[in-house]
Image (cartoon, rainbow, N blue to C red):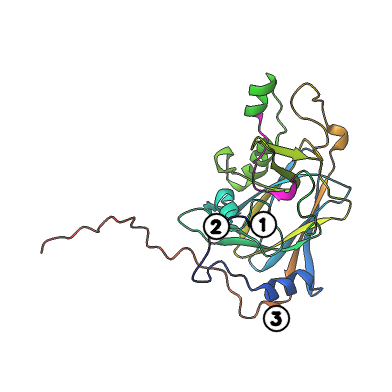
Amino acid sequence: MGSPAAAYQSGSGALDVDREFYRTLGATQRRELVESFVLPIRSGIAWQVPAGHLCRIVAIDGPQVGDLNIWNRHDPRERMWAARTRQLQAAHVSIFDRLWSTLPFLRPLATITGDSLADYGIDGEGGRVHDLLGTRCDPYVNRMLTGEDFDFHCHSNLTRAVLPHGLTEFDVHDVLNVFQCTGLNDEDRYFMKACPAKRGDFFEFFAEIDLLCALSTCPGGDLSVPLWGPDARDPIDVCRPLGIEVYRVDPDLLSGWSSPPTAAYRNLHGIELPRWES
């Protein structure tokens, strides 16, 4: 007996992806590096990725989880919607999956073009990589579970990262956990495993619109050390930096491509417009 079909399917082709186009972008050497930097351990940074550019996150020194946020650079009310992306794409994303934005915009912000862990699949314990099931670690839960304050959780790192861009803690949202291996156990509870990334592994996406991105190097590092419970300890020895690279693509490769429009729905929600008597 097969597994149930996916709940969200398109009869109009709205979820179809031009795989040849994105496969070409992911493989091309016709790209120019326009920005690169290293994100130290237990820190966060925000940067811009113009529409039509590629952005690559690299495990430059071995396994390390990165918590990613994405916004429309011109209107941060439009931001990545982790829950809808889980439904429209998958709970763990890879090449050709798209990262969708919130209502009322509902369009792809980015399309994944490269993933050196694409063949990881599902391991013997049900773990998969590049997680949308969970969200960022935060000091509020930490205080609740441990009674202690710690200001370098991913939520904190992302908050500090976006402040120079005019955003605040209220703009930080549910993340894509890049390189993170997770799943649901037999009790239907969330679990995290040691990150399988090796030095040089990467995750790359194509900016469908002008983006503001922010990334935190998780203070849990490669998540090989328990963060809570009786065996918990400070995992600083398994924390590593991540590299970020932004590439300009040869414009000829983008012939025929344009940024996707926002959702076609007119936002009336069944409410009739007022009719004024003359």
Circle 1 packing at 10 Å, graded few (<14), some (14-19), many (20+), is: some
Give me the residue at 85% from left, 42% from top. 240
Task: Give the secondary structure at mark 2.
Answer: loop
Circle 2 packing at 10 Å, graded few (<14), some (14-19), many (20+), is: few
Among numbered discs 2 and 3, the one appearing first in the sequence: 2
Instruction: Find the magenta span and give its range.
Output: 126-140
Q: Is residue 8 left or right of residue 47?
A: left
Give me the residue at 79% from left, 75% from top. 30
Q: Is residue 101 left or right of residue 130?
A: left
Among numbered discs 2 and 1, the one appearing first in the sequence: 1
Give me the residue at 77% from left, 37% from top. 42
Cα distance between the residues tagged 2 and 1: 11 Å
In front: mark 1 or mark 3? 3
Residue 155 on image: x %, y %: 65, 37
Magenta part, dominant SS: loop
- Total marks placed: 3
Foreground of the two, 197 or 168 = 197
Task: Give the secondary structure at mark 3.
Answer: helix
**Residue type for callout 2:** His
Residue 74: assigned label = 2
**Residue type for callout 1:** Gln
Q: Is residue 80 visible?
A: no
**Residue type for callout 3:** Asp
Query: In the rendered image, which residue does mark 1 sit on?
Result: 48
Cβ–Cβ under 8 Å for marks 1 and 3: no
Circle 3 packing at 10 Å, graded few (<14), some (14-19), many (20+), is: few
Query: In the rendered image, which residue does mark 3 sit on?
Result: 252
Residue 59: assigned label = none
Cβ–Cβ under 8 Å for marks 2 and 1: no
Residue 100 on image: x %, y %: 57, 57
Cα distance between the residues tagged 2 and 3: 26 Å
Cα distance between the residues tagged 1 and 3: 22 Å
